[in-house]
């Protein structure tokens, strides 16, 4: 089930990246992200239901719950960014949004692969490499936000600053949530060595 959720997170990041790079059919793409987010919420509920039943898993129930919640948070922030693009009637994404969407997509891809590698837990070094890469990408996201906000204050009007800064913060927060998920995965790998 975690793999299904990780796939949904990656798909949400892909659709957001597509929305940012090809800013057409905004409503349809935003709705697609909403659909993905709702389907992932259903998966999270199923994970929690299964955790409440009496089945044995090599990974602690608390860790599965933490990872499911962390992945859900990533998709919630992706959804939040897409909704604000639509609600604030942003005429076109800027370079900062493109850099965020690219970095977010890379982080989600690494998370997806790490979750898939967890099924075996036979190559903990590879899983840890993926988590380290997500942490590196989170630092990239921080820099994108810092420079993006500086540029906003130098070139935009007040209402545009407010709108764009909020979108930037949602995108950066999605990358932060990727780091949270990577940290949970790292903890799981350490416990199961």
Image (tube, grey):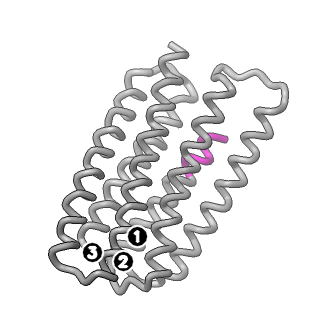
Q: Earlier in the sequence, mark 3 or mark 2?
A: 2
Using the image, determine if residue 104 lies above or below residue 71: below
According to the image, label 3 marks what residue?
94
According to the image, label 2 marks what residue?
22
Q: Secondary structure at mark 3?
A: loop
**Which residue lies at the image location 36% right of the left edge and 40% below the top edge?**
134
According to the image, label 1 marks what residue?
18
Q: Residue furthest front?
A: 158
User: In front of the other: label 1 or label 3?
Assistant: 3
Using the image, determine if residue 115 lies above or below residue 37: above
Using the image, determine if residue 119 lies above or below residue 16: above
Residue 139 position, x and y percent, is: 27, 44
Q: How many marks?
A: 3
Q: Residue 80 lies in magenta, yes or no? A: no
Using the image as rendered, state which of residue 29 and residue 147 is in the foreground. 147
Quadrant housing the N terminus: top right
Q: Residue furthest top?
A: 193
Find residue 24 and report its image quarter: bottom left
Identify the magenta region. Answer: 1-7
Task: Kindly indicate whether the residue at mark 3 contacts the one at mark 1 (C-beta within 8 angstroms).
Answer: no
**Which residue lies at the image location 44% right of the left edge and 66% below the top edge?**
16
Distance Cα–Cα, label 1 vs label 3: 14 Å
Q: Residue 5 lies in magenta, yes or no? A: yes
Using the image as rendered, state which of residue 122 and residue 131 is in the foreground. 131
Residue 100 position, x and y percent, is: 32, 60
Residue 172 position, x and y percent, is: 37, 56
Find residue 154 and report its image quarter: bottom left
Q: Earlier in the sequence, mark 1 or mark 3?
A: 1
Residue 3 position, x and y percent, is: 59, 42
Using the image, determine if residue 99 lies above or below residue 180: below
């Amino acid at each position: 089930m975690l793999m299904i959720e990780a796939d949904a997170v990656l798909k949400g990041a892909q659709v957001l990246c597509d929305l940012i790079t090809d800013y057409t059919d905004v409503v349809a793409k935003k709705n697609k992200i909403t659909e993905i987010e709702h389907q992932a919420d259903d998966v999270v509920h199923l994970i929690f239901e299964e955790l409440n039943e009496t089945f044995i898993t090599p990974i602690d129930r608390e860790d599965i719950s933490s990872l499911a919640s962390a992945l859900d948070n990533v998709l919630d922030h992706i959804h939040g960014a897409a909704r604000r693009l639509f609600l604030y009637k942003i005429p076109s994404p800027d370079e900062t949004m493109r850099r965020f969407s690219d970095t977010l997509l890379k982080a989600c891809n690494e998370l997806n692969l790490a979750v898939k590698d967890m099924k075996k837990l036979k190559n903990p070094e590879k899983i840890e490499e993926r988590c380290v890469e997500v942490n590196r990408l989170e630092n990239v996201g921080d820099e994108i936000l810092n420079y993006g906000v500086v540029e906003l204050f130098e070139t935009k009007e007040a209402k545009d600053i407010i709108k764009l800064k909020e979108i930037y913060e949602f995108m950066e927060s999605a990358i932060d949530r990727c780091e949270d998920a990577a940290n949970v995965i790292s903890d799981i790998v350490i416990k199961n060595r």
